[in-house]
Image (tube, helix red, strand yellow):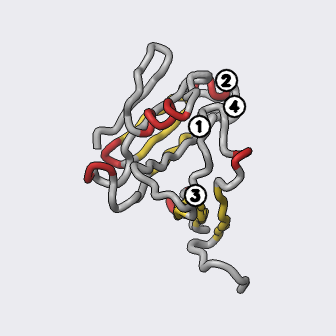
Amino acid sequence: MDVPGPDLPGDRATWCVFNDADPTAHNNSAGGTSPLGAEVQQTVFAFDDPGPMGDVIFIRWRVRNAGNTEWAGMRAGFWADPDIGGGLGFTDDKTGCDSSRSMGYAYNGQPMDGGYGAAPPAIGAVILSSSPAAPGGATPGLYAFRSYINGTDPQSFTETYNSSVRRWRPTARISWTRSDR
């Protein structure tokens, strides 16, 4: 069907745009700041394919500074809460990362699952590309990876930022891995 709008990739796709312009909505339990003037154009697409590409969903973000202030030291992060399977739900989930593939993953920690039986699912998120000018001349892709056990999420803007630049203090309650890329 020919409809007005952006040219979308894949066999199935959605597109939206959002921003942080409303100062009353620019906060959460992990901290907040004044609006930055960020505009994000998000494209989500997939292929109707019986092969391996039929199990892949692509998400593309284009981030634009629509504000009047220059961004210095900008970091973009991807946060996910996959909650794999049924049964024990999130309490038996495990996470990790493969820095050589710029991939974070989560899987069910038990071979049997109340919702999926003997074949619980897993999920992987691969950073295919990032800014061509990564911090300190680093290779674009996965820069840091962190797992939060329920209730140990960042509690402030500073903790959130420090997590994205690999400046966190691990405790016995937090399972974490990092990429040294």
The spot of residue 43 in percent (x, y) is 60, 65
- Determine whether label 3 and label 4 are within 8 Å by CB: no
Residue 90 falls in which quadrant of the image? Answer: top right
Q: Residue at x 26, y 53 (%)?
A: 137
Amino acid at pointer 2: Leu
The residue carrying mark 2 is 88
- Determine whether label 2 and label 1 are within 8 Å by CB: no
Residue 174: which disc?
none
Find the distance from the CA under tag 2 to the CA under tag 3: 38 Å
The spot of residue 61 in percent (x, y) is 54, 61
The residue carrying mark 3 is 38
Check the image and name the residue furthest to the front: 68
- Determine whether label 1 and label 4 are within 8 Å by CB: no
The spot of residue 34 in percent (x, y) is 61, 45
- Determine whether label 3 and label 1 are within 8 Å by CB: no
Find the distance from the CA under tag 1 to the CA under tag 4: 12 Å
Q: Which of the two discs, 3 and 4, labels the residue nearer the N terminus?
A: 3
The residue carrying mark 4 is 86
Check the image and name the residue furthest to the bottom: 2
The quadrant the C terminus occupies is top left
Q: Which of the two discs, 2 and 3, labels the residue nearer the N terminus?
A: 3
Q: Which of the two discs, 3 and 1, labels the residue nearer the N terminus?
A: 3
Identify the secondary structure beneath mark 3: strand
Find the distance from the CA under tag 3 to the CA under tag 4: 36 Å
Crowd rating for badge 4 (residues with CA inside 10 Å; few <14, some 14–19, many 20+): some
Crowd rating for badge 3 (residues with CA inside 10 Å; few <14, some 14–19, many 20+): some
Find the distance from the CA under tag 3 to the CA under tag 1: 41 Å
Amino acid at pointer 4: Gly
Residue 2 falls in which quadrant of the image? Answer: bottom right
